[in-house]
Amino acid sequence: MKKFFYLVLMVLLTASLIGCGQEEKSGDVNQIPTEVANPQSPDNPTDEPQPSEPTPAQPDKDYILAADDLSNLQLDDPTKPVYDKYIIWERQEKGLPITLPDLEPYEAESTIYLTFDDGPDDKVTPQILDILKAEGVKATFYVCGNMVDTYPDVLKRIFNEGHAIGNHSYNHRYDQLYSSPWSFMEQIIQTDNAIKNVIGVRPFIIRAPGGAGGMFSANYWAMIDECGYVEHDWNALTEDATPSKPNASQQINNVLRNLGDNPPRSVIILMHCNSDKTETVKALPELIKFLRDWGYKFGVVTPMTPQPW
Ligand SMILES: [Zn+2]
């Protein structure tokens, strides 16, 4: 398996180098950082229009930055996103570990993880961010690399407002992603590059387009485990990307039906934030109210988030 792994990494390294020739290589590898050397300092204003009343600046430590040796990832706070300052080929180049240590899932409180896939865009995603800000809720955005390249300022806003960012492939094309584990991983690394170019860090969490449960064979699982990624599907969904195009109240009912009479402690809800998801925007405030009334806290997806099934 190790031989296979290093062969794969060599392929990935080659692929990554093609895509990131101008990548900055500076950084003291011996220093375990406590905060990111972040080109978008939280002290800087975002590119988004600022609301009239002042909002508190997000402190640096509104997220966890992985130590070089990945030793600081066992956390008990489901509200802080977790990022890495290195793309995996940079870890390999520096001789740093890539595979994650065994981590205990977070299960202390009943927690909802709102997740939004396929963005960012410049219409629906900002409206969702406005609602999340008004409700004081953090969520997780599984972004596509091509959307990150198109709407970097919206990605910056997601990051600066304390939400988690996950990797959802570069172009979302099943024919390419599922032709081989290598093709899948190439897009994951390409998207890591796109994300890091904008916010200075990259995620550990990924979501396979279509869901890994339906799309991954054993080779895909082995590849992402070895490369230190954690995939999460979902256990509830609004069905906002189905051809039936449910309206806002139908979306809420879909989630409540998924949860049933005996809702699980840990619920990952699949939604989308690309440009035709206006009903998702309409559903969100009431959905949050329902879930909050049921006693759930809201968390962001991290490598410690329990698997939904
Ligand atoms: Zn998707």
Image: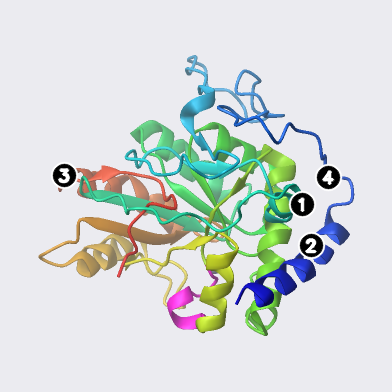
Give residue 93's mark.
1
What residue do we see at 32% from left, 54% from top? 105
**Discs 1, 2 touching: Cβ within 8 Å:** yes
Of the image marks 4 and 2, the number of the one nearer the N terminus: 2
What range of the chain is rendered magenta? 208-216
State the image coordinates of residue 20 (x, y, percent, origin top left): 84, 52
Mark 4 surroundings: few (<14), some (14-19) or many (≥20) residues within 10 A? few
Mark 2 surroundings: few (<14), some (14-19) or many (≥20) residues within 10 A? some
Q: Amino acid at mark 1?
A: Glu
Q: Quadrant of the N terminus?
A: bottom right
Camera-near label (1 vs 4) is 1
**Residue at image mark 4:** 23
Q: Secondary structure at mark 3?
A: loop
Of the image marks 3 and 2, the number of the one nearer the N terminus: 2
Between 67 and 125, the one nearer to me in the picture: 67
Q: Amino acid at mark 4?
A: Glu
Camera-near label (3 vs 4) is 4
Of the image marks 1 and 2, the number of the one nearer the N terminus: 2
Q: Report if the beta carbon of the residue with label 2 is closer than 8 angstroms to ligand 1.
A: no
Any magenta on residue 214?
A: yes
State the image coordinates of residue 289 (x, y, percent, origin top left): 24, 44
Q: Report, in whole angstroms, how far the alpha carbon at label 1 lies from the one at label 2.
A: 9 Å
What residue do we see at 35% from left, 42% from top? 78
Q: Quadrant of the C terminus?
A: bottom left
**Residue at image mark 2:** 13
Q: Is residue 38 above or below residue 213?
A: above
Q: Secondary structure at mark 1?
A: helix
Question: Is any atom of residue 208 visible in this view?
Answer: yes
Camera-near label (3 vs 2) is 2
Camera-near label (4 vs 2) is 2
Camera-near label (1 vs 2) is 1
